Amino acid sequence: MDIRAYQKSDYTQGQNIVIYGAGIYGEIAFQCLRTWGIRAYCFADRNENLKEKYGLPVIKPTEIKKIDNSVILLASVNYLKDMVEFLLSQGVTNFYNITELLEAEIETENMSEYQQDIMKNKGGYQFALDNVFSNKFTIRNIDLVITEYCNLRCRDCGSLIPYYKKPTHIKLDEILSPLDNFLNAIDELYELRILGGEPFLYPSIGELLDACGKLSKVKRIVIYTNSTVIPENMIFERMKENHVVLHMSDYGTYSGKVKEIQEKCLEYGVDFYVHEYNEWRDMGTTELRNYDLDTVKKIYQICDNAKCPSFYRGKLYICPRAAHGESIGAFKNSQGEYVDFNKKTDTAEKRKELMALLYERDIFSACYYCNGNSIHAKPIAAAVQL
């Protein structure tokens, strides 16, 4: 089954356009429709707490089939396959992809840096679309943790990095060998996100980039930096050679090297984008919450971190909180809440474990020690220092 792209010429008067997904792709779809001179009818999203967005109502996905003369635009990457499967289970087939919509000529200066990066690099959506009906086992992204060192001490760090009493750099072979075992268990990984801590503090970052650049199953490599460290020129050369994208977090006065790093990227031809963070979402401390089962399921269901698997010390965890919370001794993950790739084992068995970890669970132990992270959660000031 092919999912046809929605075209501007498909629109007719009285058509009720439902943007399925109220996250970042939903926001972009809304803006692109306006560029085409089309106003959407509503958003649909499984977050029950979200009632309105951009002046439009937000309905539950179960209500989509009740809308007459509707057209559903699939505005998500992480949940695209889930959306299609749900709509088909409801007998709804009038859904379209948004590849053509993303080509709309839109003024990007009013968009966030992250939205601009999506408009510039549309491969993520196409990757997800290609794999909706594919038999290949593909993963959208993983965070590759290479160091626990960071030169900021952010009180509300979602990865809990400032709470390491004795941070260490992870040895290069202890990163690459398990990563190879992981890649042997899947068919494709769209985005490998290299982070820490602060990755530019990692002494073997150049060798790591050269090794990762040779991984044929990896389609895109992104380094996440807090923009406090200017790497050596050789590192910029290796980023360019290995087609690495640099995500620069800008925390205002704390990120004092933004301009200098930008200039270096332009000099060496390194693709980059700057994401200004004025606020984060309050994930809270690692204290045990008194959640009942229904509450923790809802928190996990809408948590953005639930789609950010973290590869840390040879194990894949569902999110950074699960990985680092256990490492600092805040809680323990149960059996089946991570997949260990430190030793070579049967590839088919590891694939089953991965499928179970990523797609078959609806709660994790870490959820009981977290507020969750979604765009609809309580905002707090970003990068407040301890």
Image (spheres, rainbow, N blue to C red):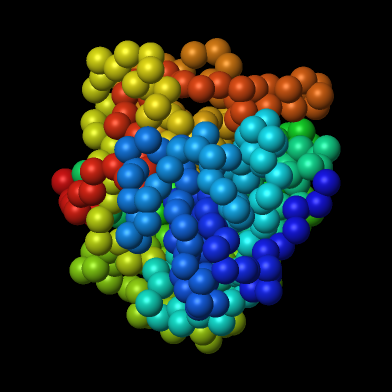
Q: Quadrant of residue 309?
A: top right
Residue shown at the point (55%, 13%) measured from the top left? 335
**In the rendered image of this protein, does residue 12 appear above or below residue 342?**
below
Q: Return the residue nearer the eye: 318 or 170.
A: 318
Up the image or down, 297 lies above or below 269; here it is above
Query: Does residue 117 appear anywhere in the picture?
Result: no
Residue 188, given in percent of the width and then of the height, sits at 75, 46
Q: Is residue 79 visible?
A: yes
Q: Nearer the viewer, residue 257 or 205?
A: 257
For image coordinates 46% across by 31% down, the residue present is 301
In the displayed structure, 327 sits above or below 248; it is above
Q: Position of residue 360 (x, y in %)?
A: 61, 22
Query: Is 131 above or below relative to 318?
Result: below
Q: How many marks?
A: 0
x and y percentages locating residue 156 in the rendered image: 25, 43
In the picture, measured across the screen, residue 4 lies left or right of residue 71, that is right
Q: Residue at x 47, y 73 (%)?
A: 34
Q: Position of residue 210 (x, y in %)?
A: 68, 60
Position of residue 162 in the picture relative to residue 352 (left or right): left
Q: Along the line of sight, which residue is nearer the eye, 320 or 329?
A: 320
Residue at image position (37%, 56%) is 56
Task: Answer left or right for 285 relative to 266.
Answer: left
